[in-house]
Amino acid sequence: MDLMKITKVVISHQHWDHIQGLNGLLEMNKGITVYVCAHSNKNFKDRILKQKAKLVEVKEKINIKEGVYSSGECLISYKGEKIAEQSLIIERGKDLVLLCGCAHFGVLNIIEKVRRSFNKDIYCLIGGFHLMDKEKRFIEFVVRECRKAVKKIAPSHCTGFLGVSLFREVFKEDFLEIKVGKEIGF
């Protein structure tokens, strides 16, 4: 991917493992539009503006480009930390592809919010589902509920080894293995 062709970036949330490469991208590609949650840290937003980027603070569902949306920010307190997080939604005609950063808000809550907001089914759910430190029974519950709610799934990042294994087992041919650099087309 040619980084100079990137015109818009959506930051799911402000954790270091989701923003680590942003400064480098903004240094080499001035004028990019960066979508961040409105409740993101002021210093973080100021750093983006200092890099001559256009900053869009997201509170509610917003259209990023034709057929691509932010879910709007979800606010949660997790282990004493206030987290503002957004997901990315891509319309595929009659259904949706949903990309989660870490799903601190709860992947099932995010699925429900997006289904209500768009009144469409979710074809594929991609991303981190923040299950790595959860008990097996809870993970099994989430996997079963996801199976009812989405056709295909591509868990990664903070889903955890057990979570990924259970999703693979339950979703079978509808499980997509995702790694850095992997392209998925729909």
Image (spheres, rainbow, N blue to C red):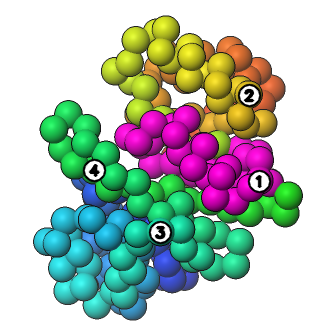
* Amino acid found under the numbered disc labelled 4: Ile
Residue contact at pointers 4 and 2, CB within 8 angstroms:
no
Which corner quadrant of the image does residue 62 belong to?
A: bottom right
The answer to whether residue 15 is left or right of residue 165 is left
Total numbered badges shown on the rendered structure:
4
Residue that carries the numbered disc 3 in the rendered image? 60
Residue displayed at 70% across by 59% down: 118
Q: CA distance from mark 3 to mark 2?
A: 27 Å
Q: CA distance from mark 1 to mark 4?
A: 27 Å
Q: Nearer the viewer, residue 57 or 100?
A: 57
Q: Is residue 185 magenta?
A: no
Magenta-colored span: 95-124
Q: Nearer the viewer, residue 60 or 172?
A: 60
Q: Which mark is residue 120?
A: 1
Q: CA distance from mark 4 to mark 3?
A: 16 Å
Earlier sequence position, callout 4 versus callout 3: 3
Residue that carries the numbered disc 2 in the rendered image? 148
Q: CA distance from mark 4 to mark 2?
A: 28 Å
Earlier sequence position, callout 2 versus callout 1: 1
